[in-house]
Structures are given as C-alpha cells and as structure tokens.
Image (spheres, grey):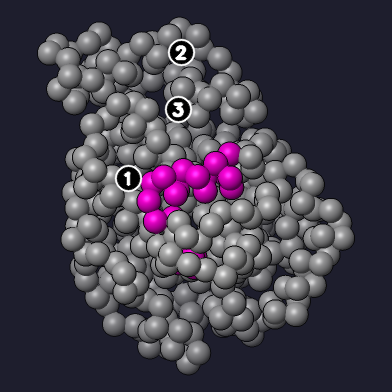
Amino acid sequence: MSSLNRRSALSLGVALGLAGVAGAAPAWAWSPAGSVAGTGTGTDPWWVWDDEVDALMAGILDTGQVPAVNTALRSWVDNGDPLPGGLPAGLATYLQRVDQLPSWADRAKLRRAADFNRRKDTYLFMLYGLGSGIMSTVIPREARAVYWSAGGADMKDRAAKTFTFGYDLSDLNAFEPGGQFVVSATKTRLVHAAVRHLLPQSPHWQAAADEQIPISNGDILITFHSLGTFVHRKLIEWKVPLSAADEDAFLHLWQVAIHLLGVRDEFIPKTWADADAQSTQVLTPLLAPTAEGKELAEDLLGLTAQADLGVTRGFLNEFVRYVLSDEVGDWLGLRRDYAAAALIRAGWPAYIAFREGLLPVAPAGFFMFDQFIRALAMLFLNNATSPTTTPITIPTGNRPGT
C-alpha cells in the first residue's frame, strides 16, 4: 500500500475511533533509548509495515506470479543455498539484500543460544506449545488475522509450518550456512507481505478487525513478547536455573529473529528489562477473547489431544490454565478438571526441581510428567516437517469459502 493510502488508513482509523476498541493497540510510549539501535524517530510501530516488500508482493499477487515464485522458492532451504533462478527481478534483488544477519548480530551469542535451546528444550517445548501457541488465540489481532487468512482453514497444516519455523529457530545450526532459519524467516516475511495485501480484501476480516492493515511492526513485537518474553518470564517464575550469559544469548536469538522478520531496530528491546517494559505496554492490555480465537484454540488443543500424550484432555486444559491463567482458560471455555489441576500445581514445581538437581529423589508423578513432556516434544518434532514436504508458501487468497 502506498504511503498516501497508509496515511488515509490512519485517518480513517482515528475517525472511526478504533483506538477505543477492546483489544486495540494502546498509544505508543516506549522509548527507543531501550532498543538495540539506542535511538529512533519516535514512530509508532502500529503504523509501520514493510513498505518495499509489501509493494513487491502486491504486484506479484495482482499479476498472478505467486505459483511460479513458490515453485522457484521450494528449493531454497538452507541459509547457504544460492538464491534460486526464476524469480521476478525486483524480488530477487530484494532477497539478496535482506537474506542476511544484521551487522550487530553476535555469532558467539547465537551459538550459545542454540546450546541453551538444547539444554532447556523440555521447558521450551512446553511453553511454546501449550503457552505461546494458545496465548496467540487470545491476542485479538493475531487470532483474527490467522482465522480469516488462508492458513486458518487448515490448522494442522498451519501448525506444521509454525512448528517448522520454531524448530528452525531452535536448531543448533539455526544461523549457520547449513541451518535454515534465515531462509525461513525471509520466506515468512514474504508471507506476511502477501497477507497484508490479501486480508484487507476480506469483508469478514474487515468486519471483525480493529485495524486497516494487519501484521504491523507492532503486531510482530506482540508475537515476540508472547514467545520470547513470555518464555523468559516463565523460566524465572518456575525457578529454572539460568546464567546471565544464557539469558543474554536467548534474548539475542529473538532480537535477530524479529529483525529478520522486518521489525525496525529502534523497536527491538536491548535488554530483558526493556523487553518486559515493552511487553507490559503492548501485550498485556491487548489480551482478550474473540470468537475466532476460541475456535482456533479448540482446533489446536484438539490436534494435541489426538496425539498419544498419555494424559487426558482435562489434564491438557488444566496445564494451559496453569501456564497462562484461569482467566484465559475461562475465555477459551476450557472445561475444569480439578484433580488434574491439583496434580499439576503440586507436581510440576517438584518435577522441575528434581530435573535441575534441587531434589535428591524423584517426586511422585515425575515419570508421568516426563512421559507427557517427551510425547509433547515428539509431537512438536513430528510436526516440524521438512521444508520439502511442508514448505512455507505464499498464499494467493484468504480463508476458503469466505
């Protein structure tokens, strides 16, 4: 969308009073002094998108070139792979420029983050899957964008692609030439640009949304906080031992990741304290139930419940409540299982303490929790399929049948 049209969208949003809609973005008040850039223009990220690639993808969509682009990109998998031929010239030029780490990326920190992911994968699988994944369904803008886009109609396929993205980020070689995350992030940036062009054409999304254009820099920041910042907070809350170097490396992993997704450096928090302050402003006030989010949560939990995790659906519901809150559980209509709730609240802290060497003897219920976590990890890994079987592809439309 042109700058003129974006300004028109802003004016329309003000005229309609969208700032007062439940779940709408709050006024931006976070200082860029707390960013990796250390300075900034004071621009509001809710009105920043990804102008260059947005214009490129709009042209590719409008001229019917997406199938050919998807075919060309299918063989582009590893970070060290050369850019494939057969791409429109403007897109090829753009990809050559953005498909690389920022100048401030620290490869030593990224390697440490990869090792941290390996050492703490038990908790990360749990928190990303039953925490961040379900939290996304009570972030109104994200839930509506997912539901009314093409991916919302097939949550199994979309979940597989999301798991692949997460797996690529957590892989030991994520940012190395033999890893895949830089390419995955760049492809995701193309998908976001396509969705920004397509969703405003959906009358269903227009009727539900409180924004004129989805997936702004502000929206991506919210997703970061529902993942990285949330996980970091929970690890501390659960008293998982963390070194300062590990915490710093884990943050750096996410700083680089959201830069690769097109977030301006002036919005990316410099420290965990800065991230917490930003999250308190932009994520916490936005959490709310929606009809779309409730359906998506049921789809995701239904997919999880179908796997052989060795626990009941009531246990799953209560673990979501334990990780996120009873308020979120009530929003999503998750049926209570008070026996499972009591088991989790007593058993999970003891499980962590024993795993971390803080208890000399395995507590009651340890092996049940261990089996559950292993099964959940296998579900995650089995869904994180090869890019050749579940590739990240650019959509050509919105939710089918709408």
Question: Which residue position is annotated with label 3?
Answer: 323
User: Which disc, if any, is residue 341?
Assistant: 2
Between discs 3 and 2, the one toward the N terminus: 3
Q: Is residue 379 above or below residue 397?
A: above
Residue type beneath disc 1: Asn
Q: Amino acid at mark 3?
A: Val
Mark 3 and mark 2: span between their CA atoms?
A: 11 Å
Q: Position of residue 348 (x, y in %)?
A: 33, 19
Place of residue 381 in the rendered image (x, y in percent of width and height, measured from the top left): 31, 45
Does dot 2 land on a helix, a strand or a loop? helix
Which residues lie in the magenta part?
263-284
Q: Would residue 334 be visible to someone looking at this image?
A: yes
Residue 271 in the magenta stretch? The answer is: yes
Sequence-earlier tag: 1 or 3: 3
Choose between 208 and 324: the one closer to the eye.
324
- Between 389 and 198, the one lying in front of the other is 198
Q: Nearer the viewer, mark 1 or mark 3?
A: 3
